[in-house]
Image: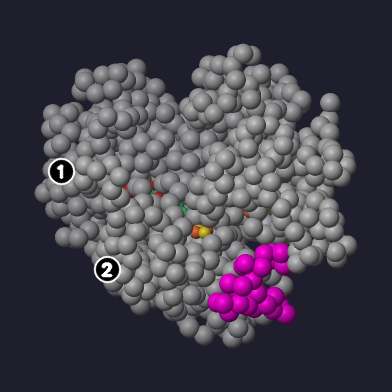
């Protein structure tokens, strides 16, 4: 036996079969004579990226990861059991104790949009019916939350069977711009058959890849740079700069990654695209691979998106069969393959370096930057990582050119933006708007407010974003205006709150979200999130804060912004502090 | 670069207004030391790869939005570093306060010194309305060699590094869980005798807070009889094999109470194996742990 110490518990046939199927023959061959000492470390790391799929297989087979099951995975992949356990316990969707209640787990969202639609009542109902309920952070279906019907987002985690979400057997009906001629990114939503390459091509699909191949990689990168496209995942980094940096790297394997982890509370735009126009994501990622010279495409998608995962996989399979992916993708002479990896319930894995760590089979802990992903990304190799919405923009850019692209939007925010409208609006859903549209117009587009009461606040950019009040209704939705007025577009969340909603309850939940989701690596964030949450709980109970507690709010925010490792800690106090500064929190002086 | 292979490329930077020149690749933290500026550290050690997670060593670098961890960031030509600005002082004070509010730092005198220096006040979190959440776990005593008291653990990752890639390559322990619930743990929290642990004690050697300590030390502390001021440290060479590891035998009342090795020693870098660390039964017998058959 190799060098690892593995305890005696063994896997049963169900577990072994599940893991074998997930690994599909791709594992380390361990021979009795082979001593994996130091030199073996690289062999171990070589297959470690299969750890997450293997853990998923165990979880799905039995509803938990048993010691015997973990041992089997550890032996097969040569991962030390303590480390594999450390990875398994990092994720919400994995359990390491036999669950008291067998069978499927029903995850019910308790984040803001669902919270104000009655998540607590729904959970009580389900529990009374004996359903195995697990309270979940935002499930990326915020448009389904409805305070009139009491519907909230649900994700069913299967045991011995598939996972499912509400949309499984119904066509998607919550898109309100269907057929709008001015749409760029969403033009095929509700129009194209998301399961058919034929239908995709009939609606203009793969014309962009053809155009890109004609232009050549350098011209594509130039067009993307000239278009002024910036990242839609939250940080708004110029995409052209990123692609050129990766394109310039030579001599090492390169990667392009679609960051489909979409877990920012209030965000569901990527899901709508992936479920309803999956081929577009595959085509756009292929263009990215072609432009940057990367042969390896990866899609890291959150574990709670089973329908999107299935549709993307189907799209990959069909594209491969049609020669649009593969050793000579679309006749470009460029080799390009795409592999999908599922996350397992961890918001932090959307942070790019945490995503790499997670995909590589380690705990989803962010890494220090510098070095940046363009030189040291996935497997420490050059990597361009983008949000799927960012990628979709490229499909238009290569067809209409940078100037054509800039014909809409503003000088500094060209193009259009997907916004996720939720909360107390009449028609929640994803909307594509031209940059420069005002916040008030956006709310009107979504049918205006619903329920009784006046608009009190809008959460912009999600839990990591900030609250704004009515005085922002005239703010044009652009990167520059948001920055100037001290808020953010973030991932495109626009969540409306009327004055009949107690904002303090929402702030308590937001602080709980950060407390639950911090990776725990660095002290400012690990402890700061807990102390912030305690302060919000006190506020909820007492209706006000002592001056000492009020001082803590500021002190905690400053150390988290200044000294945390990653964007999570840098933004985890934004929503609460913005609400306080705007005077939206009774009992707390701004 | 010159062609002379012995010449060292240096970089010049400014720290607290003072011009400092250091070899290329030197960390800001080391540059501070060379300028006589003392910097608190917790997760950094000279014999381990920097993980830069504790953030107690942060400094302000001109032009950088956030503060940077001085232990891991190399000094660069022309850098302007502040180690005593209001932001730096605030962050260091808060990081120490946060740690002290959640774990027991009684046996970490170095940290306490810095807490006094920065005016950290852990009582701020224990306000009457809601006491601050603490780790709050009983010590794990699973054998006669060493104990683990995670109520004292600051999650500096040092033990994990020493057990893993940085020294021992045994990987018996890792970080498990997430956020405030993260803990150092074996797989499924099995006892050490049931784990991969080979009792090299390297985790004890690197732990900065007494969360992992010799059973002998633990017992004496429990009996209120741990007297560092009465202890002698005798440096010797391990007699078991020919490698030549240096040992420091800590004795109290002429009895060995713990064994360390100097971190700067060329052979050990502070790391030992079970024989040097615990193999003094022939001087004073103790029970050895047994792994389940
Ligand atoms: C805590 C945290 C979570 C994030 N989650 C996501 C996410 O779910 N999807 C995403 O595209 N970007 C996310 N990001 C941003 C990524 O780190 C990265 O900037 C982005 O994927 C780059 O793609 P873009 O340039 O196309 O926006 C997150 C960042 C942080 C700090
Ligand atoms: S800021 Fe928070 S999420 Fe980011 S590394 Fe630190 S603990 Fe982890
Ligand atoms: S004694 Fe050695 S093997 Fe055991 S946990 Fe500590 S470092 Fe790892
Ligand atoms: S047990 Fe000690 S060395 Fe290990 S993480 Fe905790 S404080 Fe650090
Ligand atoms: S799904 Fe409930 S808030 Fe997003
Ligand atoms: S000592 Fe530098 S981050 Fe811990």
Left or right: B239 as drawn, with respect to B48: right
Q: Quadrant of residue A166?
A: top right
Give the residue drawn at x 47%, y 46%: A354
Q: Which secondary structure, mark 1?
A: helix
Name above or below for residue B88 compared with residue A271. below
Task: Check the residue under mark 1 and report the chain it is in.
Answer: A
Q: Which residue is mark 1?
A: A223
Q: Quadrant of residue A338?
A: top left
- Magenta residues span B103-130
Task: Check the residue under mark 2 and report the chain it is in.
Answer: A
Give the residue drawn at x 75%, y 64%: B228
Label 1 beta carbon less than 8 Å to ligand 1: no
User: Is B194 in front, or is A17?
Assistant: B194
Q: Which secondary structure, mark 2?
A: helix
Mark with earlier residue (1, 2): 1
Q: Is residue A322 magenta?
A: no
Query: On the rendered image, what quadrant is the N terminus of chain A found in?
Result: top right
* Residue A481: image tag: 2
Name above or below for residue A52 compared with residue A579. above
| x and y percentages locating residue A182 in the rendered image | 22, 49
Give the residue drawn at x 61%, y 47%: B270
Q: CA distance from mark 1 to mark 2?
A: 25 Å
User: Is B222 in front, or is A262?
Assistant: B222
Residue A335 in view of the camera: yes
Name above or below for residue B164 compared with residue A563. above
Give the residue drawn at x 81%, y 58%: B252
User: Is B86 in front, or is A236?
Assistant: B86
């Amino acid at each position: 036996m190799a060098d690892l110490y593995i305890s005696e518990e063994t896997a049963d046939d169900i577990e072994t079969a599940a893991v074998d199927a997930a690994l599909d023959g791709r594992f380390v061959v361990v021979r009795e004579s082979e001593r994996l000492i130091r030199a073996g470390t690289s062999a171990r790391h070589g297959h470690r990226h299969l750890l997450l799929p293997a853990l998923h297989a165990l979880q799905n087979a039995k509803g938990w990861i048993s010691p015997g099951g973990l041992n089997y995975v550890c032996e097969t992949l040569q991962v030390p059991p303590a480390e594999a356990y450390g990875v398994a316990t990092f994720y919400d969707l994995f359990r390491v104790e036999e669950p008291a209640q067998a069978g499927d787990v029903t995850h019910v969202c308790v984040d803001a949009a669902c919270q104000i639609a009655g998540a607590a009542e729904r959970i009580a109902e389900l529990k009374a019916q004996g359903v195995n309920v697990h309270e979940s952070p935002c499930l990326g279906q915020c448009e389904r939350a409805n305070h009139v019907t009491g519907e909230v987002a649900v994700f069913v985690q299967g045991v011995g069977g598939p996972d499912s979400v509400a949309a499984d057997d119904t066509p998607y009906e919550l898109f309100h711009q269907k057929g709008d001629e001015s749409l760029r990114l969403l033009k095929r939503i509700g129009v194209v058959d998301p399961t058919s390459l034929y239908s995709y091509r009939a609606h203009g699909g793969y014309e962009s890849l053809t155009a890109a191949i004609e232009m050549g990689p350098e011209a594509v990168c130039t067009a993307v740079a000239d278009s002024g496209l910036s990242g839609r995942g939250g940080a708004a980094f110029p995409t052209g700069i990123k692609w050129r940096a990766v394109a310039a790297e030579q001599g090492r394997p390169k990667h392009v990654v679609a960051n489909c982890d979409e877990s920012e509370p209030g965000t569901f735009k990527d899901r709508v695209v992936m479920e309803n126009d999956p081929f577009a994501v595959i085509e756009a990622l292929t263009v990215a691979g072609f432009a940057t010279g990367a042969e390896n495409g990866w899609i890291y998608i959150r574990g709670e998106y089973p329908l999107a995962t299935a549709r993307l996989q189907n799209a990959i399979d069909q594209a491969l069969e049609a020669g649009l992916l593969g050793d000579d993708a679309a006749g470009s002479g460029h080799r390009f393959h795409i592999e999908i990896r599922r996350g397992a319930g961890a918001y932090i894995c959307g942070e790019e370096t945490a995503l790499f760590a997670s995909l590589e089979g380690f705990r989803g802990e962010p890494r220090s930057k510098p070095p940046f992903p363009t030189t040291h990304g996935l497997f420490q190799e050059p990597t361009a990582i983008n949000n799927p919405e960012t990628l979709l923009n490229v499909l238009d850019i290569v067809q209409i050119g940078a100037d054509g692209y800039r014909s809409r939007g503003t000088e500094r925010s060209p193009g259009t933006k997907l916004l996720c409208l939720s909360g107390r609006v009449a028609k929640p859903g994803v909307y594509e708007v031209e940059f420069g549209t005002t916040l008030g117009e956006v709310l009107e587009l979504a049918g205006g407010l619903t329920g009784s009461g006046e608009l009190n606040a809008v959460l912009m950019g999600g839990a990591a974003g900030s609250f704004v009040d009515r005085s922002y209704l005239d703010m044009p939705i652009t990167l520059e205006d948001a920055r100037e007025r001290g808020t953010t577009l973030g991932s495109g969340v626009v969540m409306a709150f009327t004055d009949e909603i107690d904002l303090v309850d929402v702030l308590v939940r937001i602080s709980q979200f950060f407390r639950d989701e911090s990776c725990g690596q660095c002290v400012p964030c690990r402890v700061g999130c807990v102390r912030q949450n305690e302060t919000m709980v006190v506020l909820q109970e007492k209706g006000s804060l002592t001056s000492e507690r009020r001082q803590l709010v500021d002190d905690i925010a400053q150390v988290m912004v200044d000294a945390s490792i990653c964007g999570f800690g840098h933004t985890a106090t934004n929503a609460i502090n913005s609400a306080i500064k705007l005077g939206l929190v009774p009992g707390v002086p701004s | 670069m010159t062609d002379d292979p012995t010449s060292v490329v240096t970089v010049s930077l400014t720290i607290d207004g003072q011009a400092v020149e250091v070899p290329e690749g030197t960390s800001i933290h080391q540059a501070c030391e060379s300028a006589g500026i003392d910097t608190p550290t917790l997760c950094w050690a000279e014999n381990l790869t920097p993980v830069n997670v504790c953030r107690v060593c942060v400094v302000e670098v001109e032009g950088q939005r956030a503060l940077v961890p001085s232990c891991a960031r190399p000094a660069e030509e022309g850098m302007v570093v502040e180690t005593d600005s209001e932001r730096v002082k605030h962050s260091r004070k808060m990081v120490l306060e946060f740690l002290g509010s959640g774990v027991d730092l009684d046996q970490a005198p170095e940290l306490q010194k810095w807490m006094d220096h920065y005016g950290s006040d852990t009582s701020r979190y224990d306000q009457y309305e809601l006491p601050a959440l603490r780790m709050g776990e009983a010590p794990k005593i699973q054998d006669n060699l060493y104990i683990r008291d995670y109520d004292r653990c600051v999650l500096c990752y040092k033990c994990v590094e020493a057990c893993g890639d940085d020294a021992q390559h045994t990987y018996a322990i890792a970080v498990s869980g997430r956020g405030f619930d993260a803990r150092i743990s074996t797989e499924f929290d099995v006892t050490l005798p049931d784990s991969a642990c080979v009792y090299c004690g390297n985790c004890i050697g690197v732990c900065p807070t007494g969360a992992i300590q010799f059973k002998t030390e633990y017992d004496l502390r429990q009996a209120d009889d741990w007297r560092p001021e009465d202890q002698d440290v005798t440096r010797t060479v391990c007699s078991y094999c020919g490698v030549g590891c240096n040992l420091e035998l800590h004795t109290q009342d002429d009895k060995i109470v713990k064994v360390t090795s100097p971190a700067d020693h060329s052979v050990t870098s502070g790391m030992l194996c079970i024989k040097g660390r615990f193999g003094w039964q022939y001087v004073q017998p103790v029970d050895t742990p047994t792994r389940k058959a």
